[in-house]
Image (tube, coloured by chain):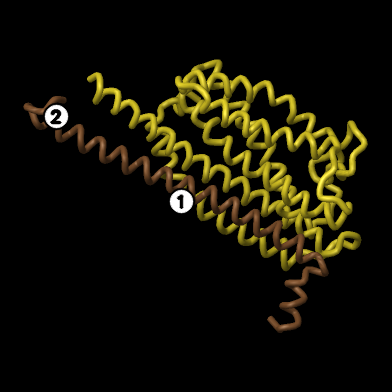
Chain colours: A brown, B yellow
């Protein structure tokens, strides 16, 4: 893209201050929610795996309290 | 329907669908953004500011779509004690709240240059603000009780009562005098906007819809796993 064309694109016909924030906030909110959701799945699945491993250890150890 | 009452089946379904939904979402939103920002024409009245429409309108549609799912899943959870439906409602609420927030914020950014104001207390804007508070209220009520089952029930009832707001939002532009323009896509007699604008709008709306299913399946999986952890902990203590 030419420099003139790029700056015209970025200027958005004088509405740059409204168009770009609208798209930027949409991207930030949607990506933020996605990242938070992926993290919570990973975190909980790791917790579950740890808990299952713990329970398995206890059931294999007859002197254990469980 | 009852096949999906089984959380294990839902977990497997989620694992299969999530990668495809993620890929579809990325492709559709990337294509939608290109069409919205580069390939589509400026409006003869609104100039380049019309491009805000391509995020504002799909976000507003999704805000109502998510609420319909929230209310529907809450009803199924209340009536049939369907555990996955309850969790689906809980998983939907933050996504719907995010879309409602985006509809309000991008609407404000569009209103300033076009109407000369960030906000007016008219029927459409006020009813969407109430929708946002309904989502926040649902999430607050869900976690307000020591007994999570009571919280889920109270929040589900609130979601059902609040559903009355959805037709109010849809028809607010017809029932009251408002600054907000009337429907130009989902109206009797078909869309009135040009195909060059309908295409980016449709692609972006499709991308937002696959985004919803992508994120709700992830959140649903997190809820189901959290339930399993709780059950194991109880067995550890009492078992």
Image quarter of the C terminus of chain B? top left
Residue B111, position as x, y percentages in the image: 83, 51
Rendered residue at 63%/27% (across/down): B71
Q: Tell me the SS state at disc 1.
A: helix
| Left or right: B104 in relation to B77 | right
Residue B210 relative to residue B123: left or right:
left
Q: Nearer the viewer, residue B207 or B103?
A: B103
**Residue B58: x, y in percent?**
70, 48
> Which residue lies most toward the left here?
A63
- What element does badge 2 sit on? helix
- The answer to whether tags 2 and 1 share a subunit is no
* Mark 2, residue position: A59
Left or right position of B46 against A33? right
Residue nearest the observer in this picture, A45 or B36: A45
Seen in the image, is B201 located left or right of residue B120?
left
Write down the chain letter for disc 2: A
Q: Quadrant of residue B121?
A: top right
Name the residue at the top extreme: B79
Cβ–Cβ below 8 Å for labels 2 and 1?
Answer: no
Label 1 belongs to which residue? B19
Of badges 2 and 1, nearer the viewer stands 2
Residue drawn at point x = 54 percent, y = 51 percent: A32
Write the residue at 33% across / 32% down.
B229
Q: Numbered disc 1: what chain?
A: B
In this rendering, is residue A44 above or below A32? above
Q: Give the Cα separation between the discs numbered 2 and 1.
A: 36 Å
């Amino acid at each position: 893209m030419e420099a003139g064309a790029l700056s015209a694109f970025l200027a958005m016909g004088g509405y740059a201050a409204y168009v770009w924030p609208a798209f930027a906030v949409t991207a930030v909110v949607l990506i933020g929610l996605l990242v938070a959701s992926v993290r919570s799945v990973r975190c909980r699945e790791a917790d579950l795996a740890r808990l299952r491993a713990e329970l398995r250890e206890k059931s294999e150890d007859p002197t254990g309290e469980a | 329907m009852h096949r999906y009452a089984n959380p294990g089946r839902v977990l497997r379904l989620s694992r299969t669908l999530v990668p495809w939904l993620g890929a579809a979402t990325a492709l559709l939103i990337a294509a939608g953004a290109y069409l919205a920002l580069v390939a589509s024409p400026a409006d003869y009245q609104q100039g380049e500011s019309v491009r805000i429409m391509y995020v504002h309108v799909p976000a507003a549609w999704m805000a109502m779509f998510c609420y319909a799912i929230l209310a529907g899943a809450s009803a199924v959870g209340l009536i049939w004690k369907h555990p996955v439906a309850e969790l689906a409602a809980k998983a939907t609420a933050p996504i719907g709240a995010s879309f409602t927030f985006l509809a309000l914020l991008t609407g404000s950014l569009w209103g300033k240059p076009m109407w000369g104001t960030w906000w007016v207390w008219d029927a459409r804007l006020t009813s969407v603000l109430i929708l946002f508070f309904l989502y926040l209220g649902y999430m607050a009520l869900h976690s307000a009780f020591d007994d999570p089952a009571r919280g889920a029930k109270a929040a589900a009832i609130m979601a059902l009562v609040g559903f009355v707001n959805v037709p109010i939002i849809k028809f607010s532009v017809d029932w009251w005098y408002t600054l907000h323009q009337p429907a130009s896509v989902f109206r009797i007699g078909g869309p009135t906007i040009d195909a060059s604008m309908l295409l980016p709008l449709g692609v972006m709306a499709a991308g937002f819809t696959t985004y919803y299913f992508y994120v709700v399946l992830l959140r649903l999986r997190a809820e189901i796993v959290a339930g399993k952890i709780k059950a194991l902990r109880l067995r550890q203590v009492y078992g």
